[in-house]
Image (cartoon, rainbow, N blue to C red):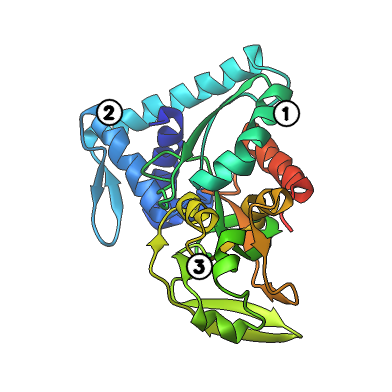
């Protein structure tokens, strides 16, 4: 728990009179505010607030804690002013998450460049193909590939990534390459939730087509689909950052070039825009610049 942040959440909640109002003022979600308050109470070893559906009120311990929290925050500010680095210099440690394949293919090199550029910043990377809770895992930044952001997500679009329909030469020796998207129903399609397990969407001649697909292999890991398509098990949709190097080497063949598979957006997702640490702000700006230079299409 970031105790200073928890103290600020506590002070703001008391001033605003409710968790919802405090969340709005701080630019946080209500569950995040509730979590900070609960963890502060666990740390203090006492209930600090009486909670009802209509109002909040301080307990005796809460009244004492409120005064102490204000003192500690003022002390923290004075320490920062007296011994802190120049304003605007990124420092601290960030915790970020991304999918395993995006992390290995693109993101790790970018992060290595970032920490070299800003030696006062450290980065912990959590690579997972499961959606990770920013609150539960204390994540500062999530890099996600999706076209369906939730309604309350705070995000910045970093780039758009092409998706390529591919097959290995070994597969195409056994089966003729599809000439039209409608022929995909005649092929074994390797399926991944990244691009849909029952329908693949294309834009052909200005027309958007949703094509039903089936296959005998599906996976929740894009790297597994990559290995299967390289083996010659079927056709697959792969993000450009995975497919293009393999196409360049001749290990895969791009299919249906006249039709463009629907691209996917790459987002930076974070808890709030307010009071963003300089290191996090600089990282998002850096990634936006690097993703624009990356080979994504």
Up the image or down, 179 lies above or below 95; here it is: below
User: Which of 147/163 is in front?
Assistant: 163
Mark 3 and mark 1 residues within 8 Å of each other at the beta carbon: no
Q: Residue at x 79, y 47 (%)?
A: 293
User: Which of 74/213 is in front?
Assistant: 213
Compared across the picture, whether 4 is left or right of 102 comes to left
Q: Which residue is drawn at 64% across and 16% down?
A: 84
Choose the circle earlier in sequence order: 3 or 2: 2
Give the position of the N terminus as an image quadrant.
top left
Q: Is mark 2 on a helix, strand or loop?
A: helix
Q: Residue 43 carries which label?
A: 2
Marks 3/1: CA–CA distance: 31 Å
Choose the circle earlier in sequence order: 1 or 2: 2
Badge nearest the viewer, 3 or 2? 3
Q: Mark 1 points at which residue?
A: 88
Say few, some or many: other residues with alpha carbon within 10 Å of mark 3 (under 14 / 14 to 19 / 20 or more).
Answer: few
Up the image or down, 292 lies above or below 255; here it is: above
Marks 1/2: CA–CA distance: 31 Å
**Quadrant in which residue 197 is drawn:** bottom left
Q: In the rendered picture of this protein, how many numbered marks are placed on residues?
A: 3
Residue at far top of view = 83
Percent position of residue 59, x then y: 23, 39
Percent position of residue 208, x then y: 66, 85
Compared across the picture, whether 77 is left or right of 130 comes to right
Q: Residue 268 carries which label?
A: none
Q: Residue at x 60, y 35 (%)?
A: 108
- Can the viewer see residue 81? yes
Q: Residue 151 carries which label?
A: 3
Give the position of the C terminus as an image quadrant.
bottom right
Marks 3/2: CA–CA distance: 33 Å
- Can the viewer see residue 147? no
Percent position of residue 294, x then y: 74, 47
């Amino acid at each position: 728990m970031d105790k200073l942040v928890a103290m600020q959440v506590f002070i703001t909640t008391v001033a605003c009179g409710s968790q919802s109002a405090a969340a709005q003022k701080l630019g946080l979600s209500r569950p995040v505010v509730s979590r900070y308050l609960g963890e502060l109470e666990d740390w203090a070893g006492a209930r600090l607030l009486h909670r009802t559906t209509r109002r909040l009120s301080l307990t005796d311990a809460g009244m004492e804690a409120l005064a102490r929290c204000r003192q500690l925050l003022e002390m923290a500010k004075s320490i920062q002013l007296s011994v802190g680095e120049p304003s605007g210099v990124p420092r601290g440690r960030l915790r970020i998450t991304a999918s395993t394949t995006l992390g290995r293919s693109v993101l790790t090199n970018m992060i290595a460049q970032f920490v070299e550029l800003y030696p006062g910043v450290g980065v912990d990377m959590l690579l997972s193909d499961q959606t990770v809770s920013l609150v539960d895992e204390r994540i500062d930044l999530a890099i996600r590939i999706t076209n369906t952001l939730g309604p309350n997500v705070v995000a910045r679009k970093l780039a758009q990534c092409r998706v390529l329909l591919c097959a290995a030469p070994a597969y195409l020796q056994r089966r003729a390459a599809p000439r039209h998207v409608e022929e995909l129903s005649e092929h074994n399609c390797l399926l991944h939730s990244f691009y849909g397990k029952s329908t693949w969407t294309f834009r052909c001649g200005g027309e958007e087509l949703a094509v039903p697909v089936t296959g005998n292999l599906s996976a929740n890991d894009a790297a597994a689909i990559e290995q299967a398509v390289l083996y010659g098990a079927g056709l697959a949709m792969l993000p450009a950052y995975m497919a293009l190097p393999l196409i360049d080497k001749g290990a895969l063949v791009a299919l249906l070039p006249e039709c463009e598979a629907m691209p996917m957006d790459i987002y930076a997702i974070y808890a709030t825009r307010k009071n963003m640490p300089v290191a996090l702000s600089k990282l998002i700006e850096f990634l936006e610049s690097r993703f624009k230079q990356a080979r994504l299409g």
